[in-house]
Image: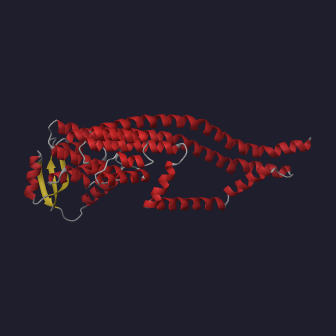
Amino acid sequence: MEYVYTVRDGQGKLREAVAQAESAAILRTRLSARGLDVIDIRERGGFSTQEIKRQLIQMIDSLEQVTLKDMVVFSRQFSAMVSSGVAMLRTLTIIVEQCPNKRLKYALDDIRKSVESGLSLSDAMAKQSSIFDRLYIAIVRAGETGGILSDVLKRLADYLEYKEKLNQKVRSAMVYPTVVLLIAVGVFWAMLTFVLPVFEGLFKNIGGELPLYTQFLIALSEAVRSIWMVMFIIACSICGYLVRRYYKTDVGRLHIDGIVLALPLFGDLIKKVAIARFSRTFGTLIRAGVPMLNALDVVKDTAGNAVVAKAVDTIYDEVRQGGTISKPMGRSNIFPPMVTQMIAVGEETGRLDDMLSKVADFYDMEVENSVEQLTSMLEPIMVVGIGGVVGSVVIGMYLPIFTVINQLR
């Protein structure tokens, strides 16, 4: 049954919420055990005005995004309180009360209710799959099984911080060329749309035959200001939609991700990021006590690239049949020989998690160096590109003037 209860907390504030229980008496006992003064408990009936308002507010708050920073703060708080001996339900109650992110707050409150009703923490988190991914749930389940929940939560926080830093490095590599490209396209469009038409009228008054390049720019300017530009935008939108639909298929994702890895300049960076993410995620799962096959299954889903996921799937099949990790790695063209050899040494010495951590550290440095090199290489290229775009239009506008001057001479 669902009950609406009203309680007074330790600070004297009235609170109203909804909870599930076998009976009102059991719910009253649970609330009293949490140190709450129970004012009223009633069965949840139809939707009152207050209930509808509460549901609307909760629906709006659920649109808020849960960032990696929010997950790091929650994991560290949870780890610190559990390791200090605070009971799990009390820990969840405290974190729910002070959680600034509304969506995460509602999810944690639902987890608290599920744990209170007898579910394990990992099973309760599995019900909130939109916030807690398979990796998080697998590590928490391993921590519950091994009795080291506080330790694995700390490792989770460290891993999420690493993931945020890695994402930031990739974003920093992509932001600069994207912004410069948008500026170049915007400048070129503005000159064709607003500047060139002014000169077009001047050219008509001058008379005579215009240079071919100027005629091309004028025709391009007229096309930009005509219905053909709208048709072009619609066609590009349709193509983008079809590409996204194709990417959602297994074959399409494998094909497009393979093309991404083969891109000049960016392909090598993306491959290094994928190797660093694979090594760090796999090492974190192994160190937390997750079984090998379960760890590989989780890593496959969190690889972020279909080609890498296919390589991990091959490793999974080999390990399931009693083989090693390094052999299928060596046959793949994704993992460099250095990574394969370090993994092989880790398997032989029984220190696989340490070797994976070293590989991840090495490729973190490689990603950082690649980002710096890519930025330093793209900066002059982009500057020259913008200058070329603007200069091409300026030359096209002034060529007729030079022609008239030559005719006057």
Who's the residue at 74% across and 49% down the image?
A: 198
Name of the residue lying farthest toward the right? 409
Name the quadrant containing residue 43. Answer: bottom left
Task: Determine if residue 132 is in view.
Answer: no
Task: Determine if residue 40 is in view.
Answer: yes
**Residue 207, x across and y down, in percent:** 86, 51
Q: Nearer the viewer, residue 14 or 248?
A: 248
Q: Is residue 21 left or right of residue 386?
A: left
Who's the residue at 17% across and 54% down the image?
A: 119
Who's the residue at 72% across and 44% down the image?
A: 392
**Residue 17, x across and y down, in percent:** 20, 53
Judging from the image, the colouring scheme is secondary structure
**Residue 358, x across and y down, in percent:** 35, 35
Q: Is residue 182 left or right of residue 135?
A: right
**Residue 187, x across and y down, in percent:** 64, 45
Task: Identify the image quadrant of the C terminus.
Answer: top right
Q: Is residue 230 left or right of residue 273?
A: right
Who's the residue at 16% across and 35% down the image?
A: 84
Q: How many marks?
A: 0
Q: Is residue 195 above or below residue 346?
A: below
Task: Identify the image quadrant of the N terminus.
Answer: bottom left
Q: Is residue 31 left or right of residue 123?
A: left
Name of the residue lying farthest toward the bottom? 46
